[in-house]
Image (cartoon, rainbow, N blue to C red):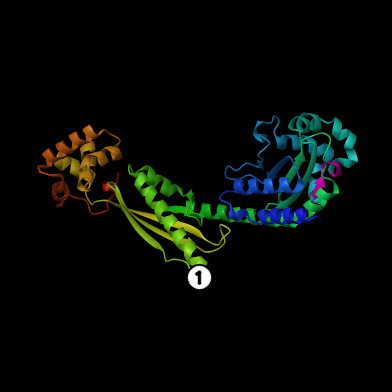
């Protein structure tokens, strides 16, 4: 083996064994494909993983598998009963096309699979690594190809290099699928919680939010502010943890508490870490969101006693929060002119001189025996 082969092999092994050093699974697969193309002097490469959460099963820069008719899995189903290729490939671990189809080479060259799939794709000489991994023992594979019908061939050198890559490939896809199974279980758990939950990776990038948080955001016209606060908590905690872990191996920051005040509700955000290697680095950021009514003022009572319309009630609560006309317009999806008109109407009906007096007027108007207790459901909208 030449010095160039050794350097290329080391680079490919390092890339294969670093699925969690990349921001997405496709970024990892892209890096692996490129390293294998360079190592094996290949024209094309494909990295296949069992699909989940919208991921593509087959990833390649050169092939557009989505446009194939029939699709690649359908072609494999057509091919498998006749040539038993998948199980034979798994049993071999590393294979060239000649090794795979040697027992029936002539029939293979005459088959529809070869002439209607391989030839149009220009994937003539092929070398593959195929294993079963994960709890369900699903097939994962790496494939590289030469696009010319004659000329360069992978040969014994290619097979030997691929065999050296096989243990690393099996370990890497096993780790990735194990992580994905853990993440799926975690997602299912937090989806059943009544409080809002955001899950972010160790960089602070959101990766999942549960239905409770989705509903919470949908009900708030100022959802952008709340989403920005969630990202700040997750990102700040992740950045602080990264610095801390580089200087003190086992140290993690204390939970981060933040508050967001909107016209509709107040929110308490708590960011912390889940223990365990759920993202490949041992840290996952979890942000929980608790909601409380912004005021104890029942909206129905405010409208009745203040002779306010439903829209004027919304504007009154926003004025009580000190919002400007422009902020009210953005929150309610109306023009600034309309917001100003409603604000003037609210001040007139509540008999106050300035916006600063609206909060006290609203609370005074709705205090008394007819007012509902603080936190009552009538105050939610």
Q: Residue 97 appears at what percent x and percent y?
A: 82, 41
Q: Residue 344 appears at what percent x and percent y?
A: 15, 37
Left or right of 287, for residue 144: right
Q: Quadrant of residue 82?
A: top right
Q: Residue 114 appears at what percent x and percent y?
A: 80, 32
Residue 96 painted magenta? yes
Left or right of 324, for residue 151: right
In percent of the image, x 69 and y 33: which residue is there?
A: 71
Q: Quadrant of residue 270?
A: bottom left
Left or right of 41, for residue 305: left
Front residue of this view, candidates 37 and 60: 37
Left or right of 137, for residue 294: left
67 in relation to 350, above or below: above
Read off the residue under disc 1. Answer: 248
The span picked out in magenta is: 94-99
Q: Residue 248 appears at what percent x and percent y?
A: 50, 70
Front residue of this view, candidates 362 and 120: 120
Quadrant location of the C terminus in the rendered image: top left
Using the rendered image of the protein, determine whether residue 324 is visible from the camera's viewpoint. Answer: yes
Q: Residue furthest front?
A: 3
Residue 34 painted magenta? no
User: What secondary structure is marked by label 1?
Assistant: loop
């Amino acid at each position: 083996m030449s010095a160039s082969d050794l350097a290329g092999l080391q680079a490919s092994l390092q890339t294969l064994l670093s699925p969690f050093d990349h921001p997405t699974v496709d970024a990892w697969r892209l890096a692996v494909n490129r390293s294998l193309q360079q190592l094996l002097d290949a024209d094309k490469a494909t990295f296949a993983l069992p699909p989940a959460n919208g991921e593509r099963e087959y990833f390649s820069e050169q092939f557009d598998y989505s446009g194939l008719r029939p699709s690649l899995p359908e072609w494999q189903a057509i091919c498998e009963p006749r040539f038993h290729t998948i199980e034979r490939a798994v049993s071999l671990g590393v294979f060239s096309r000649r090794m795979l189809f040697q027992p029936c080479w002539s029939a293979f060259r005459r088959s529809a699979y070869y002439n209607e799939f391989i030839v149009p794709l220009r994937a003539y000489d092929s070398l593959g690594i195929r294993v079963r991994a994960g709890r369900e023992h699903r097939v994962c594979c790496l494939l590289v190809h030469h696009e010319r019908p004659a000329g360069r061939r992978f040969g014994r050198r290619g097979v030997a290099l691929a065999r050296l890559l096989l243990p690393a490939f099996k370990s890497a896809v096993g780790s990735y699928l194990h992580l994905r199974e853990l993440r799926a279980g975690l997602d299912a758990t937090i989806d059943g919680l009544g409080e809002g939950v955001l899950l972010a990776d160790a960089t602070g990038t959101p990766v999942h939010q549960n239905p409770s948080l989705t509903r919470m955001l949908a009900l708030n016209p100022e959802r952008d502010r709340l989403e920005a606060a969630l990202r700040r908590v997750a990102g700040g905690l992740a950045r602080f943890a990264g610095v801390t872990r580089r200087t003190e191996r086992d140290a993690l920051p204390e939970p981060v508490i933040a508050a967001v005040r909107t016209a509709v509700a107040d929110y308490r955000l708590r960011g912390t870490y889940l223990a365990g290697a759920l993202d490949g680095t041992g840290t996952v950021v979890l942000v929980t969101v608790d909601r409380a009514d912004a005021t104890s003022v029942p909206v129905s009572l405010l409208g009745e006693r203040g002779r306010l319309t439903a829209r004027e009630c919304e504007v009154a609560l926003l004025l009580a929060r000190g919002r400007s006309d422009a902020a009210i317009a953005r929150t309610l999806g109306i023009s600034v002119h309309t917001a100003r008109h409603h604000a003037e109407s609210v001040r007139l009906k509540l008999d106050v001189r300035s916006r600063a007096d609206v909060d006290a007027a609203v609370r005074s108007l709705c205090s008394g025996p007819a007012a509902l207790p603080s936190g009552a459901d009538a105050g939610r909208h």
